[in-house]
Amino acid sequence: MAWRPVAAAPLSVVRIFSGIQPTGRKHLGNYIGAIAQYVSSQERGEGIFCIVDLHAITVAYDPAELRERLYDTTAILLAAGLDPSRCILFRQSDVHEHTELTWLLSSVTELGRLQRMHQFRDKELAQRELVSAGLLIYPVLQAADVLAYRAEEVPVGEDQREHLELMRDVARRFNSRFAGGEEVLVVPEHRIPPVGARIMDLQEPTRKMSTTGSSEQGTVYVLDEPKTIEKKIKSAVTDSGSEVRIAEDKPGITNLIEILAAVRGSERAAVEAEFAEARYGDFKGAVADAVVEYLSPVRERFQALRADEAGLERMLGQGAERAREIAAGTLSEVRERMGVGPPG
Ligand code: TYM
C-alpha cells in the first residue's frame, strides 16, 4: 500500500482576549493579576490584548495625559513580554467595531443590572462632579470588546468577575433573541488566577491595590526603582502577633504571602511552611527581594521601548488592522441577525 501522509487533526486554538486601561501607573496588582497571565497565554493560544482608551474617558481625565499613559501602558506590556509576532496588541479606539457593537448590544443589556454593578456604584459615590452616562455603559463596551472577537477566555483579576458575568449574560441574550440559541456570540469564561487575583494595598491591606484610591506608599508600581520597592514592602502594615501565616485577622501578612507565592509561581502553603519560623522583618526582606527581581527586567526594558513613540504607533496600527479583520466579521453577522443595514 502506498504511504500517505496522515492528515493532522485540526488543532483548535483557544482565543484569549483581555483589556487594560491606560490610566495611572500600572501596579503590582495589575501585573500579577493580569499582565503575567497575558504573557503566559501567548503559549496557550491566540492572544488578543487591547489598551482600552475609550473606557478611560468615562471619568474626569486630561486628553494630553491620556496619550502619554497609553504609550506607557503599551511599553509596559511589551517590556513584560507581549510579542506582537505572537499576539495581537492594539488600541481600542482604532477599531470602530467596538463602539458600534456597544450600541447594538445595549439593546440586549438590562438597565437595572448596569445600575447595580459594584464598580458603577463605587465610582458614582466617589465622583464629585459629573457622573457620565459612559460610566453606566462602561460594562457594555467591555462586553463588546470581548464578544467582537468571539474569545473563549478572558484573563483578569478578581475585581472583573462581575463584568465577566454581565458579558456572558449579554451574549446569551443576544444568541437567544437573534440567533435562535445558536452560539453566534461565544459565551466567554473568565480566567482568574488561583494566586494573586486580588493584591491588596500594603498600607491598608483590606483594600485592593488600585490606581485610584490607594496610597502612594501602599502601591508598588511596575516602574518603581528597586530602592522604592524595598522601602514600600519593608514598611508594609503588618498585624499584631509574630507568625507568618494566612489568617483573616492577618490581612497584611496574608497579602505578603500571596504576593510572594504569585511572583515565585508557587503555592501560598509553600510560602507559609518556608517562613513558619521566620520573623516579620526577615520575611518582608524576602518578599522585597523577590518583587525587585520580578519587576526589574520589565523596568529595564521599558525605557528603550517607551522612547520610540513612532515605533509604538506603528506596532499599534498593525495590531489594529489584524484586530479589525476579526471584529468586522463578527459585526457583519451581528448586523445581519439584527436586521440592521442592507441584507448581506
Ligand atoms: P484595569 O485596567 O483596571 O485592570 C487591568 C487588570 O488588572 C487587574 N487588577 C488586579 N489584579 C489583582 N490585584 C489587584 N489589586 C488588581 N487591580 C487590577 C484587573 O482585574 C484587570 O484584569 N474594565 C477593565 C478593562 C477592560 C477589560 C475589557 C478587561 C476593558 N475591556 C475586556 C477584560 C476584557 C479594567 O478597568 O481593568
Image (cartoon, grey):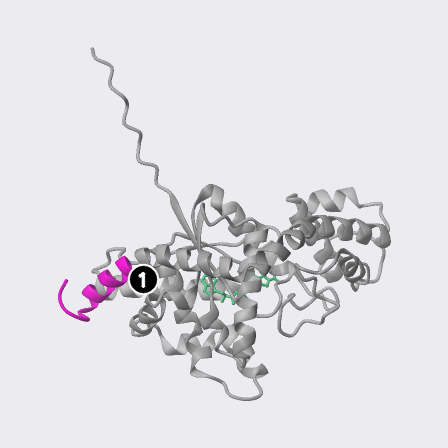
Q: Is residue 7 magenta?
A: no
Judging depth in this view, the residue of 44 and 78 nearest the camera is 78
Q: What quarter of the picture does the N terminus occupy? A: top left
Mark 1 sits on what residue? Answer: 172
Q: Position of residue 164 (x, y in %)?
A: 44, 62
**Left of 243 or right of it: where is 180?**
left
**As displayed, is residue 58 above or below residue 154?**
below
Choose top left, top right, bottom left or bottom right for residue 306.
Answer: bottom right
Q: Position of residue 253 (x, y in %)?
A: 76, 57
**Left of 79 or right of it: where is 313?**
left
**As displayed, is residue 92 above or below residue 268?**
below
**Left of 282 or right of it: where is 174?**
left
Q: Residue at the far top: name it.
A: 1
Q: Is residue 338 magenta?
A: yes
Q: Which residues are magenta?
A: 327-344
**Residue 22 shows in the view:** no
